Amino acid sequence: MVAQSFDQPLLEISVEQLARQMADSPEQLQLIDVRERQEVAIASIEGFEILPLSEFAQWSGEISTRFDPAVETMVMCHHGMRSAQMCQWLISQGFTNVKNVAGGIDAYSIIVDHSIPRY
């Protein structure tokens, strides 16, 4: 992903809210994990599509055909920095309902599901 400056405000969702929404209406969510494949091998949450930022060139051209820009889209990484970058990029691509998972999978492991390994 090319470094860019974005001016759009970024919405965040807590890991508790994410867990509730995933339990209540998973079919109404698009879930994207931008961590590297070796990170996902250590810790993951079912339902997230893996789009490593290091593979941006391979998947970026397909983003609007793989995902609906109008559907609520949650983006996660390890702590929330890479996912924030991805959220801003998605907004620049016309996505209208994007949220960064605050604290990433690390917070999810600590607060929601202790069985997910921390790294």
Image (cartoon, helix red, strand yellow):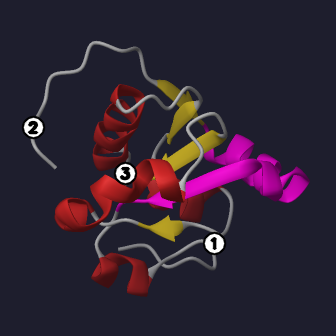
The residue that label 2 is drawn on is: 3
- In the rendered view, does 111 fall on the left or right side of 76? right
What label does residue 61 carry, if any?
none
The residue that label 3 is drawn on is: 79
Q: In which quarter of the image is residue 22?
A: bottom right
- Identify residue type, mark 1: His
| Residue found at x 72% / y 41% | 17
Foreground: disc 3 or disc 2: 2
Residue 23 in picture, x, y percent from top left:
85, 58
Let me know if residue 1 is in the magenta part: no
- Magenta stretch, residue numbers: 14-34
| Distance in Å between CA atoms under marks 3 and 1 | 16 Å
What label does residue 114 carry, if any?
1
Circle 3: element type? loop
| Residue found at x 39% / y 37% | 90
Whether residues under marks 3 and 2 lie with C-beta atoms below 8 angstroms apart, the answer is: no
| Residue found at x 30% / y 66% | 52
Q: Which of 18 and 34 is in front in this view?
A: 34
